[in-house]
Image (cartoon, rainbow, N blue to C red):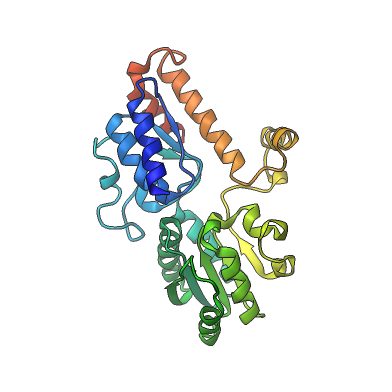
């Protein structure tokens, strides 16, 4: 919600005690909040917000990015997850390793979906993976059978759903899977949530598991070092099973507190706020 995001950022900027801002999860929200917080000189750390243009230019960024997000001409934003350019390269490698030769890209109307689709297109062209088409779908539509039939008629053997889980990604994926029973389906970190993968929460059916592949900067519990596994276990005891992004949120706050402690004599001197931002970026 752009209005709510703006309200949050304005509230933080207006509060003279604000020394740091954790968020946002989505790049579309960060595109709204970064300029407001930047103008106020408030350092910001996102657990995700992976759009390339938030931090760099190039083929996957839009005109004017990233300069338009930093009116103070000082960088105040950092994230703990890799950008979409990294995830896109991984997606292309994954698809090629699983035999994809013709990929159809479907994207929602959100910043995250659009940006990742663009990054994927750039990475696919470099790696020689053929992208048949990149098509936007309406997140408010009541059904997607016609869309699924159109994609099936393209004879793609792989489909990438570049969306966030709140953009009807579940129903879209189910319709595509029904229309293309032999195709492999891929998705990005925007849907790496229980609301997409858990049928009990409205997610896709378990029968899709053998041909559904999702990339995410978060790792499986066993892949983390001891400290990471202990965090997940503690989180689960208190709050229930964590979403993949939970550990990224934890790391964002840990990085912010570490930067504050280093740059402001233990947090007692807010006047050194710019140093907090430099610490966040250097450590992130």
Tell me the residue at 72%/33% (across/down): 238
Tell me the residue at 60%/64% (across/down): 170
Instruction: Tell me where residue 209 sits by quadrant.
Output: bottom right
From the viewer's perspective, tell me whether residue 169 is left or right of residue 72: right
User: In the picture shown, does residue 235 fall above or below 154?
Assistant: above
Number of callouts = 0
- In the image, residue 163 lies at what x, y percent? 50, 61
- In the image, residue 283 lies at what x, y percent? 46, 32
Specify whether residue 73 is in view: yes
The extreme front residue here reads 142
Instruction: Tell me where residue 168 sits by quadrant.
Output: bottom right
From the viewer's perspective, tell me whether residue 47 is left or right of residue 126: right
Tell me the residue at 48%/70% (across/down): 106
- In the image, residue 205 lies at what x, y percent? 71, 66
From the viewer's perspective, tell me whether residue 266 is left or right of residue 96: left
Specify whether residue 281 is in view: no
- In the image, residue 111 lies at what x, y percent? 41, 56
Near-viewer residue (185 or 93):
185
Near-viewer residue (123 or 195):
195
């Amino acid at each position: 919600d752009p209005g709510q995001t703006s309200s949050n950022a304005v509230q933080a900027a207006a509060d003279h005690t604000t020394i740091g801002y954790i968020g946002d999860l989505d790049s579309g929200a960060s595109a709204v909040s970064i300029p407001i917080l930047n103008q106020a000189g408030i350092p910001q750390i996102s657990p995700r917000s992976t759009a390339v243009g938030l931090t760099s230019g190039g083929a996957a960024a839009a005109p004017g990015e990233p300069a338009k997000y930093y009116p103070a001409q000082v960088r105040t934003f950092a994230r703990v997850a890799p950008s979409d350019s990294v995830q896109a390269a991984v997606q292309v490698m994954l698809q090629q390793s699983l035999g994809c030769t013709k990929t159809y890209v479907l994207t929602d109307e959100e910043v995250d979906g659009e940006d990742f689709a663009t990054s994927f297109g750039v990475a696919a062209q470099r790696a020689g993976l053929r992208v048949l088409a990149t098509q936007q779908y309406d997140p408010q539509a009541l059904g997607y059978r016609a869309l699924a039939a159109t994609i099936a008629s393209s004879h793609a053997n792989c489909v990438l759903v570049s969306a966030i889980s709140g953009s009807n990604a579940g129903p879209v994926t189910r319709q595509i899977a029904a229309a293309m029973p032999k195709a492999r389906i891929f998705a990005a970190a925007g849907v790496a949530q229980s609301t997409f993968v858990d049928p009990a929460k409205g997610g896709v059916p378990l029968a899709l598991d053998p041909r559904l592949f999702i990339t995410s900067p978060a790792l499986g519990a066993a892949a983390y070092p001891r400290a990471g596994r202990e965090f997940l276990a503690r989180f689960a005891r208190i709050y229930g099973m964590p979403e993949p992004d939970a550990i990224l949120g934890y790391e964002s706050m840990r990085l912010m507190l570490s930067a504050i402690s280093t740059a402001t004599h233990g947090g007692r001197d807010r006047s050194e706020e710019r140093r907090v931002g430099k610490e966040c970026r250097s450590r992130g």
